[in-house]
Image (cartoon, rainbow, N blue to C red):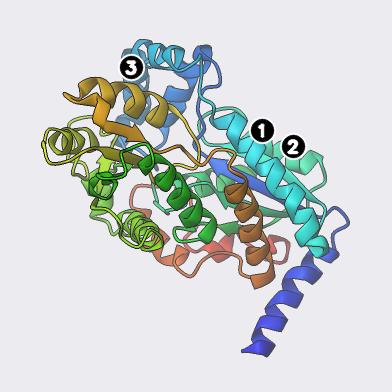
Amino acid sequence: MLRAFTRRFSTAVNSTRNSSNGTAVVFMNMGGPSKVSETRDFLFRLFSDNDLIPLGPFQGPLAKFITWRRTPMIEKYYARIGGGSPIRKWSEYQAAKACERLDKISPETAPHKPYVAFRYAHPLTEETLKKLLADGVTRAVAFSQYPQFSYSTTASSINDLYRLSKVHDKEGQIKWSIIDRWPQHPCLINTFANHIQDSLAKFPEDVRNEVVIQFSAHSLPMDVINRGDSYPAEVAATVYAVMQKLNFSNPYRLTWQSQVGPKPWLGAQTEKTCKRITNNESVPGVVLVPIAFTSDHIETLHEIDIELVEAMDHPEKVVRCESLNGDPMFVDGLADLVKEHLQSGKLYSKQLPLDYKLGSVTAKNVFEHPDEFFGDRSKK
């Protein structure tokens, strides 16, 4: 076992040392419009994504129609939370700080250069890929900022990177690996546990242990779940690990938010469940925890902080747990996670090939196996 670890570590280090320009760390996420005026384009890209929302042969026209209908409403939401999504600000901050720490704790793979690649907002994956190539990057880690894998989210970003690389990096200048999931990493679990304890402290001590911890994650259509998507299990794994860290100090539930359209979606629904809990006289309060988000965006700042609270009969009972954002423990942990990935020599997780076997039902122009993209493509 020691020899195997040493061999993998040597491979990872040597592949980086062969490059004179270190390691790029690319934070990948769906993104959000930084300004209200970017909302329409953001929504159109989102609804045009067949990996996320498969609409069949009429994807284009339906995406235009849905965008036209929803844009005025969503623009008002972004205006109400400050004029845009803060996700770019936090992603760039997290990536920069993580790379600063990586230069100190992993000098053998330094210098580490931070990048952000969003699926539906600037900086788009294509923009970031072109910058990577222009900067002469030859070694890059794609770091999914969805801690729990779903084919609809993480794989959509991977697919986008793969398709664009076939166009812009045909010679395989950049050697990629990916952190495609990290649902129980200590940086995630410990930071959430600390933030939950801070939220519980806002309730009187004599009733604090009776406050319900309600975890909320973005829902998915049941037809995606029924393919065998790993997302529900990985979200639940995060929730359970957080509660273990808290010694199961409080009653808790996992619920799902952000359902859109007439299709059946994974439930129970966050808003309905929260209302039922807070209407119970014996429950002193609820701490809402956005467990699948690493920073604030519209689903926390508007959907929970405004829409959900306004829908409650007893809004005074609801406390939303602070998002991870710029917490130093979290950001330092992200650097540790990347270092662990680089030292492992692994190009992707053991689960990723199965994710593609089960998930790529409607996807087009994607690889059948991760080996087709990750690693040294110039030798293939």
Residue at screen point 66% across, 54% down:
335
**Is residue 301 shown above or below 91?**
above
Kind of element beneath mark 3: helix
Q: Which residue is mark 2?
A: 131
Write down the quadrant of residue 256 in the picture: top left
Q: Amino acid at mark 1?
A: Glu
Q: Are marks 2 and 1 in contact (CB under 8 Å)?
A: yes
Quarter of the figure with the C terminus: bottom right
**28 horizontally vs 215: left or right:** right
Q: Is residue 212 left or right of residue 103?
A: left
Q: Who is closer to the viewer here, 157 or 239?
A: 239
Kind of residue indicated by mark 2: Lys
Q: Residues within 10 Å of mark 2 (few under 14, many from 20)?
A: few
Q: Say whether disc 1 or disc 3 marks the residue closer to the N-terminus.
A: 3
Mark nearer the viewer, 1 or 3: 3
List the residue tagged with mark 3: 70
Q: Is residue 119 visible?
A: yes
Of the numbered discs in the image, which one, if any, rests on residue 227?
none
324 or 343: nearer the viewer: 324
- Give the alpha-carbon distance from disc 1 to disc 3, as whole Å: 26 Å
Q: Position of residue 109 (x, y in %)?
A: 79, 61
Residue at the image position 74 percent from the left and 52 percent from the top:
101
Res 345 seen here: no
Q: Secondary structure at mark 1?
A: helix
At label 1, counting other C-alpha atoms closer than 10 Å, the crowd grade (few under 14, some 14-19, many 20 or more) is few
Q: Is residue 306 left or right of residue 356?
A: left
Contact (Cβ within 8 Å) of mark 1 with mark 3:
no
